[in-house]
């Protein structure tokens, strides 16, 4: 029965990309625009005044979870 409905509940516990980006002082729309431009992590780090590791984490979060995680309950 569980296989018919997926592997788990229909919500996640990941914070939204917007919250993460804003927590490090980056404007969310500017971050998304930089992704659309195809900037490297190094270029984005220089543009936003953060470390490359920060940009790498944010990019990986976006690629794995998208813009937001669905949170909620019945």
Image: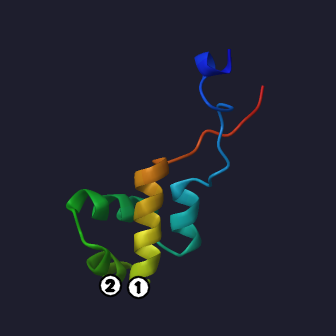
Q: Residue at 32% across / 84% down in the picture?
A: 46
Q: CA distance from mark 2 to mark 1?
A: 5 Å
Q: Residue at x 64, y 31 (%)?
A: 10
Q: Is residue 18 left or right of residue 9?
A: left
Q: Secondary structure at mark 2?
A: helix
Check contact, mark 2 vs mark 1: CB within 8 A.
Answer: yes
* Residue 11 quadrant: top right
> Which residue is at 43% across, 61% downward?
60
In the rendered structure, find residue 32 and report the number of the disc placed on it: none
> Residue 39: percent from the left, percent from the top?
24, 69
Could you tell me which secondary element the residue under label 1 belongs to? loop
Q: How many dots with numbers?
A: 2
Q: Nearer the viewer, residue 43 or 3?
A: 3
Q: Which residue is mark 1?
A: 49
Q: Position of residue 34 (x, y in %)?
A: 29, 65
Q: Residue 5's quadrant in the figure?
A: top right
Quadrant containing the N terminus is top right
Colour treatment of the image: rainbow
Q: Vertical placement of 39 versus 74: above or below?
A: below
**Residue under label 2:** 46
**Residue shown at the point (39%, 81%) measured from the top left:** 52
Front position in the image: 7 or 73: 7
Q: Position of residue 57 (x, y in %)?
A: 47, 69
Query: Picture coordinates of residue 47 (x, y %)?
Result: 32, 80
For disc 2, the neighbor class at 10 Å (few under 14, some 14 to 19, many from 20) is few
- The image quadrant that residue 24 belongs to is bottom right
In the image: residue 57, left or right of residue 1? left
Q: Can you say whether 70 is above or below 63 in the image?
A: above
Classed neighbour count for the residue bearing mark 1: other residues with Cα under 10 Å, few (<14), some (14–19), many (≥20):
few
Assign the C terminus to one quadrant of the image. top right
């Amino acid at each position: 029965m569980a296989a018919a409905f997926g592997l788990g509940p229909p919500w996640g516990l990941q914070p939204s990309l917007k919250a993460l980006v804003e927590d490090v002082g980056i404007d969310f729309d500017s971050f998304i625009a930089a992704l659309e431009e195809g900037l490297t992590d190094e270029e984005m780090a220089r543009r936003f005044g953060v470390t490359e590791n920060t940009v790498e984490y944010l990019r990986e979060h976006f690629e794995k979870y998208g813009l937001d995680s669905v949170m909620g309950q019945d």
